[in-house]
Image (tube, coloured by chain):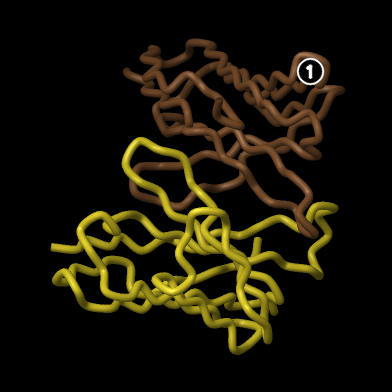
Chain colours: A brown, B yellow
Amino acid sequence: RKEVEQDPGPFNVPEGATVAFNCTYSNSASQSFFWYRQDCRKEPKLLMSVYSSGNEDGRFTAQLNRASQYISLLIRDSKLSDSATYLCVVTQIRGFQKLVFGTGTRLLVSP
Amino acid sequence: GAVVSQHPSRVICKSGTSVKIECRSLDFQATTMFWYRQFPKQSLMLMATSNEGSKATYEQGVEKDKFLINHASLTLSTLTVTSAHPEDSSFYICSARDPSGESSYNEQFFGPGTRLTVL
């Protein structure tokens, strides 16, 4: 079983739509949780951290459910520029915080 | 955020040759850098952790004699793929942790990646 599992998609949505991505992780000892965005053939970039209390940044809302080991990302009012792959990332302690990446969920926003 | 550069951005080489990839932290000192590999449609996988002034720590299944890592200064880590073969073709990405950053988990900043193609 993969440590971090995501639906690879792609999710095809029209501009203005609301779309939600989910992610599950297997290691209950995971410490921190993040969503990264990766554009085609580019490096991943931190989108936002995820907290149990929920975290909102503009059109993006992230939520963590530790009991279910489940992380979500909600994007409202989708823009063409939101088209990318969204990576769910958890950390494990190995003397430092090791990042463990999911395979990503691809989002395609069309006009 | 902090800036990390990688060079080269793309390399094509013949099977059996060695390829060196450089990772630099441009505006901060990084005692720890990380090397990842990403195959098409797969997740980034940590290959090794590069520590300045000491030996790198390799993840399980990564051959340390094939992927040589040198972290000779606080701003530079190099990854050398020795005797590269077509199955080594991949997207190699480094990241660096800024220990002086305000982030509680010491955010990792990623380089732009190096796309290696071995013919």
Q: Name the residue under label 1.
A: A65
Report x, y in % for residue B6.
44, 71
A62 sits to left or right of A65: left
Please name the residue shown 51% across and 77% down the image: B69
Work out whether A68 lies above or below B73.
above
Amino acid type for the residue under numbered disc 1? Asn
The quadrant in which the N terminus of chain A is found is: top right
Work out whether A45 lies above or below A60.
below
SS of the residue at dot 1?
strand
Please name the residue shown 32% across and 54% down the image: B90
B13 sits to left or right of A6: left
For mark 1, does the 10 Å Cα neighbourhood hold few (<14), some (14 to 19), or many (20 or more) residues?
some
Please name the residue shown 55% across and 29% down the image: A2
Chain containing the residue with disc 1: A
Seen from the viewer's position, the closer of residues B85 and B112 is B85
Report x, y in % for residue B37.
43, 54
Report x, y in % for residue A51.
81, 29
Work out whether A12 lies above or below B9.
above
Seen from the viewer's position, the closer of residues B62 and B42 is B62
Count of marks, rendered view: 1
Report x, y in % for residue A62.
70, 24
B70 sits to left or right of A31: left
Q: Quadrant of residue A65?
A: top right
Please name the residue shown 84% across and 24% down the image: A52
The quadrant in which the C terminus of chain A is found is: top left
Q: Quadrant of residue B83?
A: bottom left
Seen from the viewer's position, the closer of residues A56 and A5 is A5
Work out whether A21 lies above or below B47.
above
